[in-house]
Image (cartoon, grey):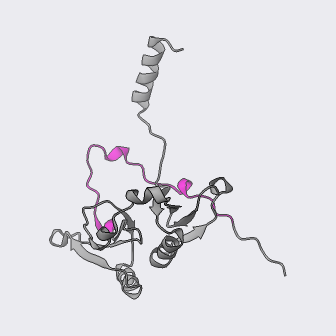
């Protein structure tokens, strides 16, 4: 057991260092009514790729998707979990101020064409037009009613604040290693 003096010293050391280990978004987990329908949506609409789930997760139905440095983990809802999903009547409402995940996109017109081709209902808006840094946004929902935003938010210039020195930009360390496919020598 640490003495009070050791605890205070340790606490001061943490405050002095004030260093949080480097982090980056790894994945977003989504409970879903149908893993198959959600895999189909996220691969066709967003271009995510299904990757193998570790055997430790074989105890429940789900799927792991990955692309752009971010994973989406889909988990099959059990009968009692339905109340944890958005209500089916909310499927049509698109409120940009509601909870959502957002993906940066460098080809907004192509993404909008894809949504139209796949008949995905979406809302399009542009914000900040008069301020010189216009941001285009597309909002739509996945099969379970979770909202997704596609934007070109890199158009926004980060304005320095006193905390700017604490911002850590992601490095390639957070990208999981990709196992190359085995070569076939037939």
Quick check: can you spot residue 29?
A: no
Q: Which residue appears at 58% of the width and 62% of the height?
A: 61
Q: Residue furthest bottom?
A: 117
Q: Which residue appears at 39% of the width and 83% of the height?
A: 110
- Residue 29: horizontal and vertical position, in percent? 47, 58
Residue 90 located left or right of residue 3 = left
Residue 147 located left or right of residue 14 = left
In the foreground, 121 or 135 = 121
Q: Residue furthest right?
A: 186
Name which quarter of the figure residue 65 lies in.
bottom right
- Residue 161: horizontal and vertical position, in percent? 26, 47
Q: Magenta part mainly helix, strand or loop?
A: loop
Quick check: can you spot residue 119?
A: yes
Residue 19 located left or right of residue 63 = left
Q: Above or below — where is 1 with respect to 66?
A: above
In the foreground, 4 or 139 = 139
In the foreground, 136 or 86 = 86
- Residue 111: horizontal and vertical position, in percent? 39, 80
| Quadrant in the picture for the C terminus | bottom right
The magenta segment is: 153-179
């Amino acid at each position: 057991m640490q003495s009070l003096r050791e605890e205070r010293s340790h606490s001061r050391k943490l405050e002095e260092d004030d260093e949080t280990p480097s982090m980056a978004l790894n994945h977003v987990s989504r409970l879903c009514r149908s893993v198959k329908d959600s895999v189909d949506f996220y691969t066709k609409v967003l271009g995510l790729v299904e990757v193998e789930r570790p055997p430790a997760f074989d105890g429940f139905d789900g799927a792991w998707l990955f692309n752009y440095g971010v994973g989406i983990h889909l988990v099959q809802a059990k009968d009692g979990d339905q109340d944890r999903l958005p209500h089916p009547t909310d499927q049509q409402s698109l409120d940009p101020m509601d909870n959502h995940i957002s993906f940066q996109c460098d080809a907004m017109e192509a993404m909008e064409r894809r949504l139209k081709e796949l008949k995905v209902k979406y809302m399009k808006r542009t914000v900040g037009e008069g301020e010189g840094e216009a941001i285009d946004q597309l909002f739509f929902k996945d099969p379970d009613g979770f909202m997704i935003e596609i934007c070109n938010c890199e158009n926004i210039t980060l304005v320095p604040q006193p905390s700017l020195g604490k911002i850590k930009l992601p490095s390639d360390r957070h990208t999981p290693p990709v196992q190359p496919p085995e070569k076939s020598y037939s």
